[in-house]
């Protein structure tokens, strides 16, 4: 069954340090997408980055990069030079194609990142 | 530019009451989703729709019904609310996640069932 696993309930990092948030997935699809979203304490969901399963290069968006290792089925988010404003909940998500039902997007349980000065 | 709008934002229900959450999007998106968010559980997919007139069950569909009569609207109904349905509900829409289309989320609706 399709599943997203985020094993780190909480992570702590100091400002300006890099941090990696882990995400592993399980799917039988050949074509799928992987996403990361950020949810600050205010509650809104903010899209960060996307990686397609056939993309050969790791996706990058500013300070965010996605370390995609297909054989290991992992899609870790790397945040370089952490800032106080990065403190939030981070969710990994995966597209899941269901025959005759279209494509759903399922989420992991999230990792809370706390950045200190 | 409204994006995705959910109404109501807050609601308190008694066990057994019914209610409908409305989601409206103005981006002409084909896909729409309803998720619930509970502490420690992340976002769990309730139902989704890949186009007008279509719906499909997600991970936790029991106790909920949905309808997509118009492309821009996706309704989530609770026929007989239970305390276990106390949660924050998020609606989202997209062009299509399989093509890398990001989800656009509403602000969430906090539902409490007493």
Image (tube, coloured by chain):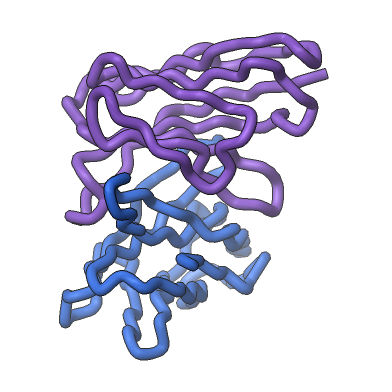
Whether residue A103 is situated above or below residue A81 in the rendered picture: above
Visible in this render: residue A80? no
Give the residue drawn at x 45%, y 74%.
A26
Give the residue drawn at x 41%, y 88%.
A72
Left or right of A66? Residue A77 is: right
Q: Quadrant of the C terminus of chain B?
A: top right
Q: Position of residue B19 (x, y in %)?
A: 60, 11
Q: Position of residue A111 (x, y in %)?
A: 59, 62
Q: Position of residue A44 (x, y in %)?
A: 47, 37
From the rendered image, report the letter of the chain displayed in purple: B
Give the residue drawn at x 54%, y 48%.
B59
Left or right of B112? Residue B3 is: left
| Residue closest to the eye, A61 or B113 | B113
Q: Quadrant of the N terminus of chain B?
A: top left
From the rendered image, report the letter of the chain displayed in blue: A
Kindly indicate the quadrant of the structure image that contains residue B71. Answer: top left
Q: Position of residue B72 (x, y in %)?
A: 26, 19
Left or right of A57? Residue B22 is: right
């Amino acid at each position: 069954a399709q599943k997203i696993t985020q094993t780190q309930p909480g992570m702590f990092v100091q400002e300006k340090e890099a941090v990696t948030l882990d995400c592993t997935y399980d799917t039988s699809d050949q074509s799928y997408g992987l996403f990361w979203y950020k949810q600050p304490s205010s509650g809104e969901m903010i899209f960060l980055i996307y990686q397609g399963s056939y993309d050969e290069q790791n996706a990058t968006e500013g300070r965010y990069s996605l370390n995609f290792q297909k054989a290991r089925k992992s899609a870790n988010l790397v945040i370089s030079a952490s800032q106080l404003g990065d403190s939030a909940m981070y969710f990994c998500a995966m597209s899941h194609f269901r025959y005759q039902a279209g494509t759903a997007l399922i989420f992991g349980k999230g990792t809370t990142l706390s950045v200190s000065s | 530019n409204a994006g995705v709008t959910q109404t109501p934002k807050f609601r308190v229900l008694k066990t057994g009451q019914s209610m409908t959450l409305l989601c409206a999007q103005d981006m002409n998106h084909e896909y729409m989703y309803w998720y619930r968010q509970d502490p420690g559980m992340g976002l769990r997919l309730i139902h989704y729709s890949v186009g007008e007139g279509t719906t499909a069950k997600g991970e936790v569909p029991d106790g909920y019904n949905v309808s997509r009569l118009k492309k821009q609207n996706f309704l989530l109904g609770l026929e007989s609310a239970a305390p276990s349905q106390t949660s924050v509900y998020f609606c989202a829409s997209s062009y299509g996640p399989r093509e890398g289309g990001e989800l656009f989320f509403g602000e969430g609706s906090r539902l409490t069932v007493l």
